[in-house]
Structure formats: structure tokens, C-alpha cells
Amino acid sequence: MKIGIISDTHDDVENVQRAIEMFNVESVQYVIHAGDYIFPGIVKEFEKLNSKLIGVLGNNDREKVHLLKNFLDIGGDLKGELAEIELDGLTFGVYHGTSKEIKELLVNNGKYNIVICGHTHRKELPNDAPKGKYENDSKETLVLNPGTAHKKVESISGAFKEGGIIIFDTQTKEYKFIDLP
């Protein structure tokens, strides 16, 4: 089964629409959003998704009631601050990544095969490789952070410089990063 991974969409409707198109082309069965939707209306864009949206809250998601309502309206599942998901024998921990200490606890506690996060707006992939494979027998937790899904813009902070989406196949355990503009 394929899953899509996205984070830090920050109200960017155009890139969310692009990501949804890519997820639909890849025939993912789930999309996991690691938070920072900002405007609850961005969740409504995922109505065009041909799979189920599962998400957690980010540090900038203040309108929690409206986010939850929109998730419910589209048949999605908003988990709160932390999600634990089991798919095809793999255990995923999903956390926005706001606290480095909490993220490290999730990565190192031995409970999760894969931790999905966001927050940094920077890709986090093993060896910075855009493609790879999770070796389940290594007992190490794979960390996948797609960076920001917001369009790339030059800024002093560099906050919207890199990112996109990730496609992860739970059967082959292969992942690939796809850049967004």
C-alpha cells in the first residue's frame, strides 16, 4: 500500500492542489499530514483526494475546532498532537516536530518503525537521498520529513526554501521524495 506524506502547507492552495494531484496519480491509500495547515479551509481542498487524510496538529494550528470540523466533513481523521498508525505491520508515529526533545523520544523509544514529522521546513531523509528503502531488520527508526509543501520563496529566514511530498510504499518499504515548486 502506498501512503503520501505532506507537512507545513501554510495555506498554499496551489501547492496543496498539486500535491493532491500527485497523490492521486500515485494511487496512495492514505495521506498523512504532519501539521501546520494554518487556515482550516485548506483541509477542504483534500476533498479532491482519492484516499483518506490523516493528520496531526502543528504549532501554528490555532483554529482546532474548525480544523476538526473540516476533517470530519471530508471523512478525514485529525488525531491531535500525536498519531500512532499501524499499516501493513509497520508502526508509524506522526508528530509535527515542534519540540526536538519529544521528537527524539519518539525516534529513540523503540516503539515506531517510522516517525513522520515536519516543522523545520527542511527535508529530512536518510543520507539526504531522494529515494531509499527502510530496512526493517535494522531496528532503527526511519525519520521522514518532507519539508514544507508551501511554494518556494526567497526570504531572509530561508523558511520556505525546500520541501515537497513523500510517497512511501508499505509493501516494498521504499520511499521517494517529490519536489514541489
Image (cartoon, rainbow, N blue to C red):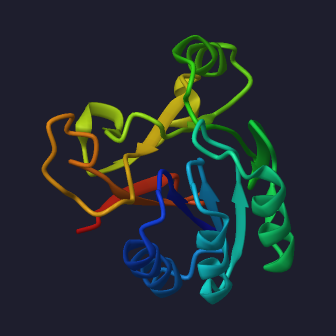
* Rendering quarter of residue 95: top right
Say which quadrant the N terminus sits in. bottom right
Which of the 4 image quadrants contains residue 120? top left
Q: Is residue 78 left or right of residue 20?
A: right
Say if 131 sits above or below 167 in the image. Answer: above
Q: Between residues 120 and 175, which one lies in front from this camera angle?
A: 120
Q: Quadrant of the C terminus?
A: bottom left
Q: Is 90 on the left-hand or right-hand side of 72?
A: left
Q: Above or below — where is 151 with respect to 90?
A: below
Left or right: residue 109 versus residue 124 is right
Residue at 75% x, 36% y is: 82
The residue lying at 60 percent from left, 60 percent from top is 171
Q: Residue 69, image x and y in percent?
A: 85, 67
> Foreground residue, 175 or 116?
116
**Which residue is pictured at 56% across the width and 27% down the height?**
98
Give x and y (percent) for residue 42: 59, 71
Residue at 14 percent across and 36 percent down: it is 156
- Residue 41, compared with residue 4, is above or below; it is below
